[in-house]
Amino acid sequence: MPVLPEATIRAACEAAAARADLAVRLRRELHRVPEPAFEEHETTRYVQGFLRERGIPFHRFRWGTGGVAVLGEGDRSVLLRADLDALPVEEQTGLPYRSRRPGFMHACGHDAHTAMLLAAADALAAGDVAVDGRVVLLFQPAEEGHGGAAAILGEGFLEAFPADAAVALHVWTGLPTGTVGISEGPIMASMDRLRLVFRGQGGHGAFPHACVDPVVMSAEGILSFQTLVSRKVDPAEPAVLTVGAVRGGSAANVIPESVELLATVRAFDPAVRQEILGGIRRLGEAIARGHGGGFSMDLEEHYPVTRNDPGATARVREAAAALLGPEAVRPAHRTLGAEDMGMILARIPGCYVQLGAATDPSRAEPLHSPRFELDEKCLPIGVMVLLASAAALLGHG
């Protein structure tokens, strides 16, 4: 038996097509006003105003950015999520609707995610697509490495707005417009952000014998940490350890007291993650001890693996195939990028969908690029997928 009847499929297609121009307008207006994590005040006001015009109550989170709205009634509920925040990137697209805020840009498509969810809310509020239950619309702040999902879950979000399943879309320029990437199981890696500090004894650069040099310790550490992936992890198992920042010292002739490293670890297997984290601590302490210095490691942030539930994913995949044709539903790109939607999917079953967003993926700019741009023809397709996924996971009227 198909997951959705023809009438529901047709309704989702027609509702999305009727809102294609709306989705583009919303996305462009949001694109002009990018805001960083937990500072999405104007974006939140925009979302709230749009929903209020349609008689949809919106509940802000206590810190003032992001929020939630609920449509429909019933015993079952599905969560549809969009993220609000932008990146500290100087836009270089030259688009007429480019960022008005120097130093910030929607370089990851969150403006599109929010626009698609608002357009889907408009269709649901109008009754254009019937669903048998409640739809929880989550407009999440702070996805870009600041733990927005952790913050809302810590505030009891799922207790206040329980859901039986969850769906999120992410625009994906590695896939052509008109396609989606859907796979069950792990599709994005866990992410740990670390602060590593080598401590020594500072002094004059002309008298290194009288000092304990943390610069040398940190150099040894950076090179040694790489062996944890190359020599401690099965080569068939994906893992990454990257040191992205080195901070220490103020002059050529001064040996500093300490050097700070900022690093990230990515993995799919929790045992691999633990092996790398434990190895960083062991190597760091051993290197520091050998020089007569000290070492500390602080875990600043952790995202779990983003893991798609097999049952929920099967229903979303079937709905997408009914909308777009089976050939348009492709395996998701498994990536060592991370996504805090994984925190929600660790609590409730659901599906994270990659939405094709490029006319030619071989020439498209990657996510987080200052020249990132998406094919706006993907927007009504995303609205369709959100509507059909909600109907498929809840049932239909």
Image (cartoon, rainbow, N blue to C red):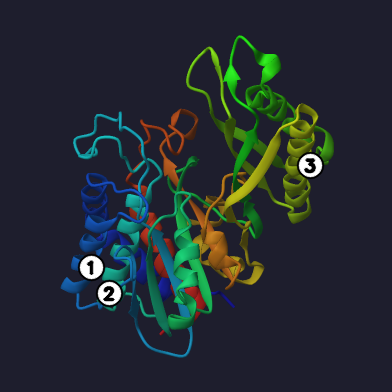
Which residue is at the front of the view, 59 or 325? 59
Q: Is residue 78 left or right of residue 91?
A: right
Q: Residue at x 23, y 67 (%)?
A: 48
Q: Which residue is mark 1?
A: 48
> Judging from the image, what secondary structure is the residue with disc 3 in?
helix
In this view, 74 is above or below 77 = below
Q: Is residue 367 left or right of residue 71?
A: right
> Judging from the image, what secondary structure is the residue with disc 1 in?
helix
The percent coordinates of residue 156 (x first, y second) are 47, 77
Distance from the alpha carbon under mark 2 to that under mark 1: 6 Å
The percent coordinates of residue 268 (x first, y second) are 70, 51
Q: Which residue is mark 2?
A: 58
The percent coordinates of residue 132 (x first, y second) are 43, 85
The percent coordinates of residue 62 (x first, y second) are 33, 71
- Amino acid at dot 3: Arg
Residue 282's tag is 3
